[in-house]
Image (tube, rainbow, N blue to C red):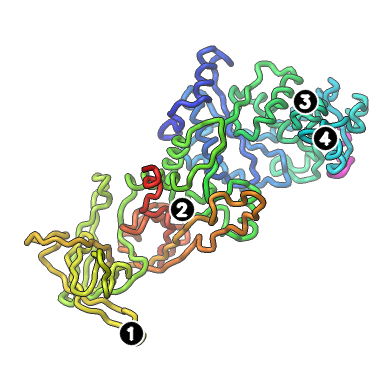
Amino acid sequence: MAEETTNSSSNFIREMVKADVAAGKHGGRVETRFPPEPNGYLHIGHVKAICLDFGIAEEFGGVCHLRMDDTNPTKEEVEYVESIKNDIKWLGFDWQEHLYYASDYFETMYECAVKLIKKGLAYVCDLSPEEWESYKGNLTVPGKNPPGRERSIEENLDLFERMRAGEFPDGAMVLRAKIDMASPNITMRDPAIYRIRHAHHHRQGDKWCIYPMYDFAHPLEDAIEKITHSLCTLEFEIHRPFYDWLLEALEWENPPKQTEFSRLNLTYTVMSKRKLLELVRDKHVSGWDDPRMPTVSGLRRRGIPPKAIRKFCELVGVTKFNATTDMAFFEYCVREELNAEASRYMAVLDPVKVIIDNCADDFVDELDAVNNPEKPEAGSRKVPFAKELYIDRADFMEEPVKGYFRLAPGKEVRLRYGYFITCTGVDKDADGNITAIHATYDPATRGGNAPDGRKVKGTIHWVSAKHALPCEARIYDRLFTVEEPGAGDTDYLTQLNADSLKTVQGFMEPALAEIATGTTVQFERQGYFCKDQDSTADKAVFNRTVALKDSWSKKAK
């Protein structure tokens, strides 16, 4: 169960449920469901629905079902089923014993279709998809009745039974609801409710060769499970009339109510499962869990805490209007959580050696380093200091510009948790590149303070060369170069960011070797990084979760 009710702020869905409970509707019972199709991995857009479905149920003492909408065997895999379950648990939600599959209801759905035929409300249509286009009309032209719409009930029952028996090939015919070919709502113009698919189902095997369409299956699943509040994103609003028509036609007692809310969209990414699948299939990314992906598994691998994602969904809110949220705001939420919880360590990602000339070759000092100044209970650790160190190249300038307060010839800086050091010179190779920096340290400044009261403006991070461990840092940026990939007629693949991943080799303090895979920490002055599953005994691999710079708060001001 989540640590807190995610959608704690007021919204129109919460007020609706509150009113229903107060009025005793459904006996005061609240039962929601999250119904993913197992044809891909969950992404952050799904998380908003998950937080709402589970959060509403939890707040009103109800239950939320996890239901796999497995009605299309050509696109569904067990891998996706397991990933969905793992992601929801990782987010902090629990469906308890309420795990269901649409395929469990196939026989009931078939019987419902037969009932519609017997009531004269469904018929078998043998038009090809191309032929159907010429009959259904468009937004300004009403449809026209197709051939076969007036078949007898007996003939439709016979054809539908033969469809189930496997007598016809894929695409030969479909079963349609008989509603109104002139309806201004195109989805009500005799929508298909069953299709022929000679495909192996991951749970039903080869038992079925006809499968219900989603718009037909979804309201039946809700009704069978006695869902009270069916919460959907706005693209399903136009399908609600069929949802209500179907349950009324089947004379379902106390049917559920469908209510729509805005979906979650983020800048610099795509949320379409088809596009995400294409990115994975064509190897534009390393997989569904690539840290550049908006998938839950990608966010997890990147080191983003589930609490930060839930908080983000809460702050975005639940409305009736689609909008796109700035990625910088999501990163702000992540940074706020990590700033409070993540331990601090030192890592040098663009190393240059510093030799402390007045330090003995065998000298080692164990310095105290605070793990998290925002969290005193996190304690401290020891950081080794020795004659040779690594610092970042950006922290040294041979000819410093005005306002540069880091290390330079004749300049003094503070080593984080350590000593004051002063640069005395540099070593260069034949090409003039700096290979080492020479310095002296002041033993009286241990811990970063001078007894004589002198101050320095620059503080830099470092690691002991003798004790440092090699690390690889993967620096991730936005996957796309534009805020709305694919907008208009643009091919979204042409807008991929060629610099969305940069890999650098550096060194880290030895304490980082002890942290577990999946742990997110702050590399001081560098950003937040998560230890990746690719780490080995010889080299740790870290993914940058988010930079330290907060562009959102600057925008907000």
Magenta span main SS:
loop
Query: Pointers 4 and 2 in contact (CB under 8 A)?
Result: no
Where residue 2 sits, quadrant-wise, is top left
Query: Pointers 4 and 3 in contact (CB under 8 A)?
Result: no
Disc 2 marks which residue?
302
Q: Is residue 393 above or below residue 185?
A: below
Which of pointers 1 and 3 lies earlier in the amino acid sequence? 3
Classify 10 Å Cα crowding around label 2: few (below 14), some (14-19), many (20 and above).
many
* The C terminus lies in quadrant: top left
Which of pointers 1 and 2 lies earlier in the amino acid sequence? 2
Rendered residue at 57%/53% (across/down): 288
Disc 1 marks which residue?
429
Measure the C-alpha gap from mark 4 to mark 1: 76 Å
Where residue 305 sits, quadrant-wise, is top left
What percent of the width, then of the height, locates residue 103? Answer: 70, 35
Residue 136 numbered mark, or none: 4
Q: What element carries label 3?
A: helix
> Mark 3: which amino acid?
Cys
The mark closer to the camera, 4 or 2, is 4
Q: Magenta region: which residues?
A: 160-172
